[in-house]
Image (cartoon, coloured by chain):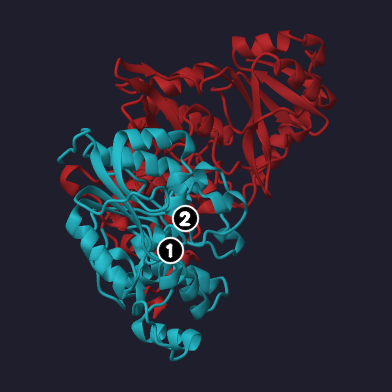
Amino acid sequence: MTKNNNNKLKIGIYELTGCAGDALLILDCEKELVDIFQAADIQSFLMAKSDNIDGELDIALVEGSVSTEKEKKEILDIRKRAKTVVAIGICACFGGIQAAFLDEKEWEANFKEVYGNIKMKHTKPVQSKPIDEYIKVDYYLPGCPIDKEQFLSTLNRILRGNPPELYRFSVCVECKWNENDCLLNKDIPCLGPITRAGCGSICINHNLPCVGCWGPVEEANIASEFQLLREKGFDHDFIKKKMANFSGTGMADFFGKLKGEKG
Amino acid sequence: MRIIKLKKDNLFPFLEIISEEADLWAPVKKGDKHAFTIIDDLSKIELETTRTIIPPKKIFTPPTFSMFSISDKGYKEDFSHITKKILFGIHPCDIHGLLTLDSFFKQAYLDPYYLEARKNTLILGLSCWPDEYCFAKSTHTHVIEEGFDLFFTDLKDFFLVWIGSSQGDDLIRLKPELFDEGLKDQDIQTYINWQAERDNAYKWNIKFIALPDLMELKYRDPLWEKLGDACLACGSCSNVCPTCNCYNIMDKQFLGGKDGKIIRHWDACTLEEYSEVAGGENFRKKRSDRLKLWYTHKLQAYISKYGKPSCVGCGRCIATCPVDINVRTVGQALLGEKPDAFWARFNKEVTK
């Protein structure tokens, strides 16, 4: 990787469609903020500063999904300028809540119901999709929002030219480490087995079922989880909606309705 | 081994005294289950428990802990999680679990973290009563002859206390007047009756003696594919197993060239990443292959090496696996029975 005058890698932090929670989390690393700005040359970070430069980058951290034509152009431009693109947060990685649909038709019908026949002057809205629907993504850092410790260690590893080292198993593993009693065994619809770990099983620690906000784990056994919930008395649509809530596009891959491969 | 008597009312005064010597850990309520926890209030200790959600292995190798702290000057071993502990209320099956872990961690490469924690922890066992998941009688781990410093058998009105080590004896000597040396014939008869009743309370039995051969004979049985199709690969069977001991190591380096840590966390051969090697190749990509490995280890390989299964009959896998893949159902299936299990009903087309 090339280095700038200060011998620091150039970083841009971008927000597409989302709640800006991941950018906010980065700003919220109060104790480590000085370290971040010392370790890297932050060229663009709209939430944190006004003198942003949109030039060549070593690393682009992108939050949010692509939901307008304008954002489509923006993400293609970011890819062109950045050597490494990291999707941060559930929206960039899997589509987020705004992608909680499983096929194109459903989205168009919903759009009409909410906005009617209104003409959008600013930009044309499109179905919300994770950024890898449009560009090659080098690394994924899921979360809703991302976890502070994981973010710092991932950033650190990428700055040193190493790939991130994230948990690749499901929430259940961390959940057992925290010695929680399995909610599925109490007939509560928990998505722990199909959801990526990294959150520290925070919901289940508070006796709430996992809602899948970190997106599907690589080896998610959707069919088995599906049948398990069916046997517990939940109906087909309820389960599908629940699974698609945070990562409709990501889940659609599993359901075989949309094409696209996940890293 | 010396056996003495302790009045029920004297247990907590005794625990109070010994808790001044080291951190006292015992089972307390967690939801409607139990968990070993450091005790700051004796009244929270639960005496009549079955299994804790995860076994006491967590006290010797916590789910995650720092092995080394690193800096530009080198690295330093980190034993900060190891403190002097007294573990009270551990059942015979879990003591057997620790003895099995000893055999793993004392092989060619001694594990300093486990062994140091072992050395610093006194084991105060407690008798228990089986529930519908326990099958420790099948693995002959419902009785215990070694591996404890003191063992308390609860006979309703009093405890019989086995003194298993000189360190256990030292604890008794802190307040010997709480104990009664003279056992009456009646006390012994009470124990004999209790033992017979307890042995009869096991609701089911599994023929472990047949399983090593059956693992071999049924190694290519379609059963394994069925299990693999239904398995959620959540790793819970390994995490709750008292004898599973695999771990992974991760670097945690802080930003700006500052210090870091080497973190060790529980891992499981039932997880996909476990058998992945450099270049992304994976020797056991299929869940069925991973389950086969897990059960080979529990029901066959350990038996050939040590003459007993590395299953201690605690029933945690039965209580935990949401899709009924556990030693009972897999054992039954290997023995040619048709267990009423989720995986036997599972249909891959369910999402359509």
How many residues crowd around disc 1 within 10 Å: few (fewer than 14), some, or many (20 or more)?
many
The residue under label 1 is A18
Question: Against B148, is A178 above or below?
Answer: below
The N terminus of chain A appears in which quarter of the rendering? top left
Q: Is residue A199 placed above or below B48 in the rendered structure?
A: below
Q: Are marks 2 and 1 in contact (CB under 8 Å)?
A: yes
Q: Residue at x 33, y 23 (%)?
A: B107
Instruction: Using the image, determine if residue A181 lies above or below residue A114.
Output: above
Q: Position of residue B144 (x, y in %)?
A: 57, 28
Front in this rendered view, residue A29 or A173: A29
What amino acid does circle 1 point to? Answer: Gly
Which chain is represented by red in the image?
B
Residue B294 in picture, x, y percent from top left: 36, 46
Q: Which numbered marker is on residue B95?
A: none
Give the percent coordinates (x, y) of residue B93: 55, 36
- What SS does tag 2 mark? helix
Marks 2 and 1 belong to one chain: yes
The structure residue drawn at horizontal position 41% and vertical position 85%, both measured from the top left corner, is A106
Q: Is A169 on the left or on the right of A25, as rendered?
A: left
Decide which of A132, A188 is in the foreground and name it: A132
Residue holding disc 2: A21
Secondary structure beneath dot 1 equals loop
Q: Is residue B185 left or right of residue B207?
A: right
- Count the labels in the image: 2
> Dot 2: few (<14), some (14–19), or many (≥20) neighbours within 10 Å?
some
> Left of A106 or right of it: where is B128?
right
Q: Is residue A178 left or right of residue A131?
A: right
Rendered residue at 29%/19% (across/down): B72
Q: Which image quarter: residue A90?
A: bottom left
